[in-house]
Image: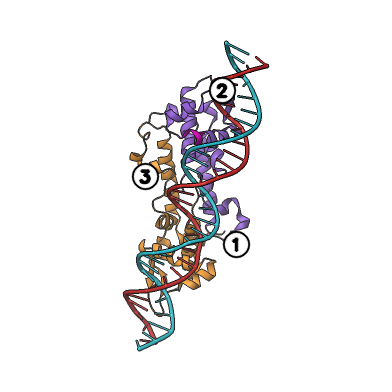
Chain colours: A purple, B orange, C red, D cyan
Amino acid sequence: MEITQETDYAVRCILFLSKTGSKKPVVIETIAAEMCIPGSFLAKILQKLTKAGIAKSFRGNKGGFQLSKGPRHISLLAVVEAIEGPIAMNRCTIHPERCNFSRTCPVHPVWTNLRKIVTEYLAAMDFEMMLKRPQ
Amino acid sequence: MEITQETDYAVRCILFLSKTGSKKPVVIETIAAEMCIPGSFLAKILQKLTKAGIAKSFRGNKGGFQLSKGPRHISLLAVVEAIEGPIAMNRCTIHPERCNFSRTCPVHPVWTNLRKIVTEYLAAMDFEMMLKRPQ
DNA sequence: CATATACAAGATGAAGTTTATCCTGAATGA
DNA sequence: TCATTCAGGATAAACTTCATCTTGTATATG
């Protein structure tokens, strides 16, 4: 029921890029050092965030990473799913066909509904909002 | 963000014991066969459920397992936590002291709040209710 | 246009977790 | 007494997580 370390790193990374709001690309090693994330691991994470359309990458000299849109338009859900794929409490929520019981299982609707609650909550949390609120 | 297979087995097991409502103890192999759970694995799971006060065990001839209280008084949260321990979306919710950032982290309150939402939802789901509702 | 810089993508692997299984011991009903 | 049944510990295969490294590719700049 926990997010992984990788997802936590991804969130910290987007948090950093949102906070600085730099118009110039930031290199991996800068983010890694500031946020205490292993650089080589962060490189992989940023690849996923880029493929998900959350970050933009620039190669070569003066290259690095930027957000591809404003923090206001990046939700916590988007970042979590960019790393972990579609989230669910129970596999049967995503693949009912793989569960022998799903058609008659009294718990199935509970997992489905909880999934909805969690995804809607995370979708409503954007990075601008989180940074503005007092801790 | 998913419950484990073991937790899913535990839920199915309590579901079975709730459904049959037997006053006589039911042996592991019966539950295992009915619910498609590996018997030796279920034995371990029932140990955890027993220690958590959800099930009662009886050794020897005519032994087996029973619920230690009515399905009405067993919540989905209790079963999940009996297997996985306290649930949380992020380790920092349970151990803020292990996170360098928790005091100033804008995401921390989000995880804390989501944890509350999820635990309250699961706590409200008892096995009598789930069995009564149409699927 | 040469070159240093920086990301892309794939291979690799250590460590930890999950998902079991088996064995010995202890309790218990008949 | 004895067959039955759970308790608890040891063991291990399979999988996931967390991380690193290497080779390749793009590019700004002098």
Q: Which residue is mark 2?
A: A63
Label 2 sits on a secondary structure element that is loop
Q: Earlier in the sequence, mark 1 or mark 2?
A: 2
Q: Residue at x 37, y 44 (%)?
A: B94
Within 10 angstroms of label 3, few (less than 14), some, or many (20 or more) residues?
some
Q: CA distance from mark 3 to mark 1?
A: 35 Å
Within 10 angstroms of label 1, few (less than 14), some, or many (20 or more) residues?
few
Dot in front, 3 or 2:
2
**Residue B94 - label:** 3
Q: Nearer the viewer, residue D13 or B89?
A: D13
- Mark 3 chain: B
Which residues fall within the magenta stretch?
Answer: A38-42
Label 3 sits on a secondary structure element that is helix
Q: Which residue is mark 1?
A: A100
Q: CA distance from mark 3 to mark 2?
A: 38 Å
Dot in front, 1 or 2:
2
- Say which quadrant the C terminus of chain B sits in: bottom right
